[in-house]
Image (cartoon, rainbow, N blue to C red):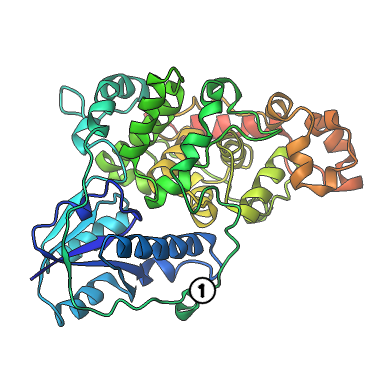
Amino acid sequence: MASVLWFRRDLRINDNPLLSEFRQDIVLPVFIFDTQILNKLSKDDKRVSFIFYSVMKLKNDLKAIGLDLAIFYGEPLEVFEKISSICHIDEILACGDNDFYAKSRDEKISQSYKLISFNDAFLLPASYGLKKDGTPYRVFTPFYKSVLPFVEILSQNQYKIKSAKLVDFDYKSIQLESFGFEKADISHIPYIDKPMELLNDFKPYFDMYKDLRDDISKKPYTSGLGIHLRFGTIGIRECIRELILYQKEGIDTSEFIRELIWREFWNMLLIHFPKSEFDNFYAVDIKWENDKDKFHSWCEGKTGVPIIDAAMRELNATGFMHNRLRMIVSSFLTKDLLIDWRWGERYFAMKLLDYEASSNIGSWQWASSTGADGVPYFRVFNPYLQTKKFDKDGVYIKRWVSEYKDIPSGKLYDENYLLMYGDSFYKKPIVVHKVASERFVRAYKDGMIK
C-alpha cells in the first residue's frame, strides 16, 4: 500500500504538507500534465514551459532527499487507474484548489480514491472568510482587520520533510515536446532557479513600496512574486514568515502583506460565492455592447490609446502586466468599450503568467463595478490622467509602442491631440473617453435590478 503525493500547484519541497502528512511508509510522488487543462492552451504557452521547468527542478530536488517524481500526461482519473493496476493506492494527498474545474475534478477522483486535501496555495482556511454571524465577508477592510492578527500565527505552521521509501515505479523523465508543446522563452521570469532569493533582493524596496509601487515609468517596484505563488515554487507560509522576519529587522513590509491578504480575500469570495466565477457578484444586468472589432483592438494593443496599447502589448509579449495597468485596461474594456468583463477575464486567463482564477475574477468584477467591494460604477478610470500620473515622460509607453517614439511625451495624455492627429502617425483612439464613460454609467443605471 502506498501514499500517492500528487503535486499540482505546490512545486517545491520546502514546507510542503505532501512530504509530511502521508501515513504509509511507501510513497509515490507524481505530477500529471492534465490534458483537460493543456488541450485548451496555445502550444507555445509560456506557463506550460514554466511549469515543465519547475517540475523538472522539483524532480531533482526530490532526488536530493532520496525520492523521485513520476511524471504523467493524461486525465488524472485515468492516470490513477493506471497507477492502481501496478500498486495499491491507500491515499492520495494533494493541495487544494478552488476554481470550478479543480473542484469538479477532485470530486470525481474522491469517488474512487481516498483524496486528502490540504490548504497550501493560500494561507487562510475557508472559515476565516466568515463573520461572527456565519455569513461571508463581502468587503475587504473588515476582512483584513479580522484576519490580520492570525496571519503570523498561521504562517508558523511549518511542515517538515518526513522520510519514506519509494514505490518501485518508472521514474523516467519526459520531454515537453512529447505532448505537443514548444519550449517558450521564459528567461525573463524572475528568480526561476532560486525563487526564495526574490524576497531577499526586494528588501531595499519594501519601505518605498506603498509610495512607488504604481510607478510604471522606470524599474517597476513590483516583486515578481505572483507566478511563484501561483504554482507554489514559493509557499505562502514561507513568504509570510520571511516578511515578518524583515519587520523585526525594522523593514516595513506591512503594505506588501496587505496586498497578499487581498489575494486571500479574493480566494474567500470564490470559495463562499462560487457562482461569481461566471456571474456578476451583484445583480446588475448591464446591456454590454460587446463589439468584437473593438475587443480585438484591445487584445492586440491597437486602440489608439497609448497606455492601453502599451500594457496589452507587454502582456502579449511577456505574460506580465503591472497591477496599476491591469486596473486601467480592465476599466477601459468594460467602461469605455462597454464589453463584458468576462471577455477580458478570459483573455487574461490565456495570457497572464501569474493567472489566479480567484484574483483575476475578483479584480475584473471590481473594475467593472459588478463585484464585491467594487469601485463605484460612476468612477471610470481616465486613461489619459492615469498616464500623466504614472508615466508622465512616456518612458513605458514608448518602450512598448514604437509608433509613439517621435511623439512628445505630453501629447501621449492629450486626448484632443490624439483624436485630431493620431491617424497621421498611428491611429486615433477608438472611443472618446467622456462620451464612452457616460454611456457606461447610463447602461449601469439601466441595468440595476431593484
Asked if residue 282 can be seen in this view, the reply is: no
Residue 301: x and y in percent read 70, 50
Q: Toward which corner of the image does residue 266 lie, by quadrant?
A: top left
The residue labelled by disc 1 is 181
Q: Dividing the image into 4 quarters, which one contains the N terminus?
A: bottom left
Of residues 251 and 231, the one drawn nearer to the viewer in this rendering: 251
Give above or below for 432 relative to 41. above
Q: Toward which corner of the image does residue 351 lie, by quadrant?
A: bottom right
Residue 74: x and y in percent read 33, 75
Of residues 392 and 430, the one drawn nearer to the viewer in this rendering: 392
Secondary structure type for disc 1: loop
Q: Toward which corner of the image does residue 139 lie, by quadrant?
A: top left
Position of 175 with respect to 312 (left or right) is: left
User: Residue flagged by tag 1: what amino acid is it?
Assistant: Phe
Q: Residue at x 90, y 41 (%)?
A: 406
Give above or below for 246 relative to 196. above
Q: Residue at x 49, y 66 (%)?
A: 41
Position of 226 with respect to 131 (left or right) is: right
Q: Residue at x 23, y 72 (%)?
A: 77
